[in-house]
Amino acid sequence: MAQPLRFRRSHEGWNSDRVDARIYSDLDDNLGAESSSPWFKPPSGYEARRFDMDNGDTALFAWNDDGAWWMGNTETPEVLWRTNKQSFSEAPYEVTRWAQRELLAQLHDEDPWLADYPYVSWFFLPVFLSKDGRETTRAFFADESAGFPDADPEDALDFYENVLKTVPLDDDRHIMAGKLGSSSYLDLARANGAMGEFDAAWLLTEAGYEITPEIEVTTGHFLDFRADRDGEQGVLAEVTRPVPTNDRAAGTPVAAVKDTAQTKTSGQLDAHAGGVALFVDCTSFPDDDWASIRAEEPEVHHRPAVVFRVRPDGSVEGYTKGAVPLDLPQLD
């Protein structure tokens, strides 16, 4: 599976003739390509090219006296095969800003409905224009309402637009966006699981906690978040999201919740030996299924635990198990 979009950093010297000989010729021979000026003015002190391939792939190349930066959702020219990769946040700011303007304009030209959601467009740009995942990731928002059952895509997009405005995840954008997947096959379980992390992050932020994603612990695992507030001891949190019963072997919604939680707790959380709050996001369940879970409030093989469900209007329902060391007024 191809990865989310990243730059390749070349430290070699470049000029227009070498770009034609080593970049454009390679792309044109392999895929058929057009070389043109970029849509937006390159950063001061840089020269740049845009390459559009016959199969719909795109690449950008910018260079100055210090070397060059390549970004493309296509084959990498041979001259760049051994170059180091850099995320949007690792490349020089002016190069990143220019490349994002180019790619966002392309994204909104291809899918104008995304132009109404600038934060969603920007945050998920590394997968929305990835080599293999550019169709499936957009379809997840447009056709699957970003994992909300029985909801309009517009309502789902409005919700996540607000989440990305308010939850401080920008510094971890490459990792968080990449969790959505960048495959030509839409893995709904994976995509929904990724959005479960955004739901939990939003729930914690709304409750007044500062969150830090991807916390490495002594077992060698990474846990999803640490939540901090007002000098209190930080609380580690791990998120899981059950798949509705019609998409899995579990016969009832309650069984689905128990099975998914047990999978998480019998591996990663057991290895950590306690001290982690488990968040079970039931947002994928339609109303009737959630009602049965809410009525029974099943155990989830771990304490403390937060079992919750979010709707696109920002309403939240749920329950807790054990002494959850977090103040979550949304669940009162």
Image: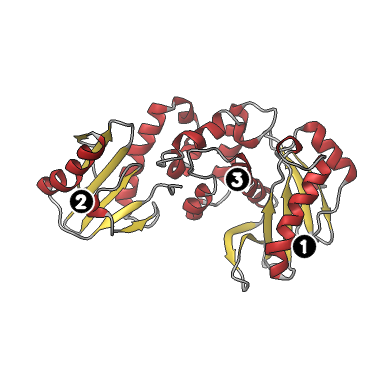
Disc 1 element:
loop
The image quarter containing residue 112 is: top left
178 displayed left or right of 228: left
User: Can residue 41 be seen from the camera position used here?
Assistant: no
Percent position of residue 2, x then y: 43, 47
Asked whether disc 1 touches disc 3, contact meaning CB atoms under 8 Å apart, the reply is no
First in sequence, mark 3 or 2: give its number.
Answer: 2
Asked whether disc 3 touches disc 2, contact meaning CB atoms under 8 Å apart, the reply is no
Q: Which residue is mark 1?
A: 325
The image quarter containing residue 243 is: top right
In the image shown, does 159 or 2 lie closer to the viewer? 2
**What residue do we see at 60% from left, 47% from top?**
194
Task: Residue type at mark 1: give it.
Answer: Pro
**What residue do we see at 32% from left, 47% from top?**
71
User: Can residue 314 be seen from the camera position used here?
Assistant: yes
Cα–Cα gap, marks 3 and 2: 37 Å
Any mark on residue 257, and which? none
Q: Which residue is mark 2?
A: 63
Task: Residue type at mark 3: give it.
Answer: Arg
Cα–Cα gap, marks 2 and 1: 51 Å
In the image shown, does 107 or 160 lie closer to the viewer? 107
Disc 2 element:
strand
Asked whether disc 2 touches disc 1, contact meaning CB atoms under 8 Å apart, the reply is no
Task: Residue type at mark 2: give it.
Answer: Trp
**What residue do we see at 30% from left, 50% from top?**
94
Q: Specify few, some or many for label 1: CA neighbours under 10 Å numbering under 14, 14-19, or 20 or more.
A: some
First in sequence, mark 2 or 1: give its number.
Answer: 2
Percent position of residue 230, x then y: 67, 63
Q: Which residue is mark 3?
A: 190
